[in-house]
Image: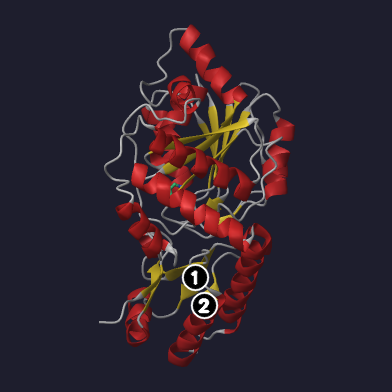
Amino acid sequence: MPQKLYFTVGPSELYPTLPAHIQEALDKKIGTISHRGKAFQDIFKNCVYQLRTLMNIPDTHHIFFLSSATEIWERILQNCVDQKSLHLVNGSFSKRFYEFAVELGKTPEKIQTDFGKGFFAKDIAIPNTCEAICVTQNETSSGVCMPLNEIYLLKQKAPNALLFVDSVSSVPYPDYDYKIVDSVFFSVQKCFGLPAGLGVWIVNEKCIEKANLLLAQKKSIGTYHSLPSLFGKAKDFQTPETPNVWNIFLLGKVAEDMNNKGIQQLRKETDTKAAMLYEYFNSSKNFSIAVSEPVHRSATTIVANTAINASEVNKKLEPYNMVVGSGYSSYKETQIRIANFPALSIEQTEKLIEALKKELQ
Ligand SMILES: *Cc1c(COP(=O)(O)O)cnc(C)c1O
C-alpha cells in the first residue's frame, strides 16, 4: 500500500529526514542511555543550541522541555500568575488555556471573538491588575493568527504584565522579538513534524522571578516542573524527571536540518505555499477562505469553508493518497484545515491543489 500524505494540522506529516534520525537514535541506543549521563547532556545541549540558532533566541531566555503544550498552559498559570491572567480567546485552544486558569482557582479574564475572527490590540483593554497576557499566536482550530506587531502592542499597554505566546502551530515561522515577548511555547507534532509527546517552553528571567516570588509567599507553584526546578536542572543540561530523551534528540536533529536549509528559506517557502493555497480557495467553486480579515489569515494553518462535507473531500482525495484536516469540532464537516508546515514541500502542496481542482474545481 502506498503511504498517504497528511496535510492534517496535528499530528502532522513527519519531517522527511526523520527515518534517518530514528535509525541513528536506534544505533546510538538513545532509548536506553541514562538521562543523568554525559550522552544525554550533549543531546540536551545540541537541541537547545539548534533551537536558539533557528529561532534566534537570546541568552536572556531559557529553554525547558516538558511533556506537551497543554502541560505548559498549566505550568504558566501555576508559576507566573497569582490571581489574574488575561486571555485573548478566539478558538478552542485559547479557550482551554483560559479554562485552566479557572480550574486552578485563579480569577482570569477573557476577551472573546467569534470563531474565525482575530484581535487588534487597539480594541483590547488590559486591567491594571493583570499579571499575565496570554495570546495564541496561531489558533489551530480556526486558522486565525495574531500579527506579531499587534502582540507587541499589548505589551506596550501593560509593560508590567508578563507576555505569554502560544505558538504551537506556527514556530519556527514567526520571527519573535524576545526583548518584548517574555515567553513562547510549542509542541513538536505540528511544525517540526515529530511524533507527539514533547513541549518546549522558552522563558525569560522575569518569569522565573515571578515563580520565586510566589514561592516566597508560600503559594503553590507545582512540584517537579515548577520553573525553579526546571531552571535548576537545565543549568546542568538535565531535566527533573526522566524526559522524552528520544524526542529531544530528534528535535535537535530536525532543527539542525532546518538550520541547514536556512530559516529565511523556510519562511519564504511557507509564504509561497500559503499564497498558493489561499489563491486556490479564493478562486474555487467548492471552497472559500474561512478567515475574512486578510491580516488574520494564518500562514501555517489554512482553513477553508467547504460546500461539500469535509469527509467527502477526503474521499475524493483517497485515490491521490492525500488527507486534509477536517474542521474543528462543530465545523468538522463544513471546513477543511490544511497544514502548511515545513515537512510539506511546495511540490506536494501543488499536487494537493491540482487534485482538489480536478475533483472539486
Ligand atoms: C495543538 C495545540 C496545543 C496543544 O498541544 P499538545 O501538544 O496537544 O499539548 C495548544 N495550543 C495550540 C495552538 C495547538 O495547536
Residue placed most toward the observer, 182 or 327: 182
Q: Residues within 10 Å of mark 1 (few under 14, many from 20)?
A: many
Three-letter code, disc 1: Leu
Number of numbered discs:
2
Picture residue at 50% right of the left edge, 87% below the top:
354
Q: Position of residue 260 (x, y in %)?
A: 60, 60
Q: Residue placed farthest to the top in the image? A: 217
Residue placed most toward the observer, 76 or 16: 16
Picture residue at 61% right of the left edge, 23% below the top:
206
Question: Which quadrant of the figure contains the N terminus?
Answer: bottom left
Circles 1 and 2, Cβ within 8 Å, touching? The answer is: yes
The answer to whether 175 appears left or right of 347 in the picture is: right
Q: In the picture shown, does residue 307 fall above or below 48? A: below
The answer to whether 320 appears left or right of 169 in the picture is: left
Mark yes or no: residue 300 visible.
yes
Three-letter code, disc 2: Thr
| CA distance separating discs 1 and 2 | 7 Å
Q: Position of residue 193 (x, y in %)?
A: 44, 59
Model colouring: secondary structure
Q: Residues within 10 Å of mark 2 (few under 14, many from 20)?
A: some
The answer to whether 3 appears left or right of 228 in the picture is: left
Q: Position of residue 209 (x, y in %)?
A: 57, 18
Picture residue at 37% right of the left edge, 26% below the top:
240
The residue where tag 1 is placed is: 344
The residue where tag 2 is placed is: 349
Earlier in the chain: of badge 1 and badge 2, it is 1
Picture residue at 58% right of the left edge, 64% below the top:
291
Specify the quadrant of the image occupied by residue 258: bottom right
Specify whether tag 1 is near ligand 1 (CB below 8 Å): no
Specify the quadrant of the image occupied by residue 294: bottom right
Specify the quadrant of the image occupied by residue 277: bottom right
Q: Position of residue 121 (x, y in %)?
A: 69, 43
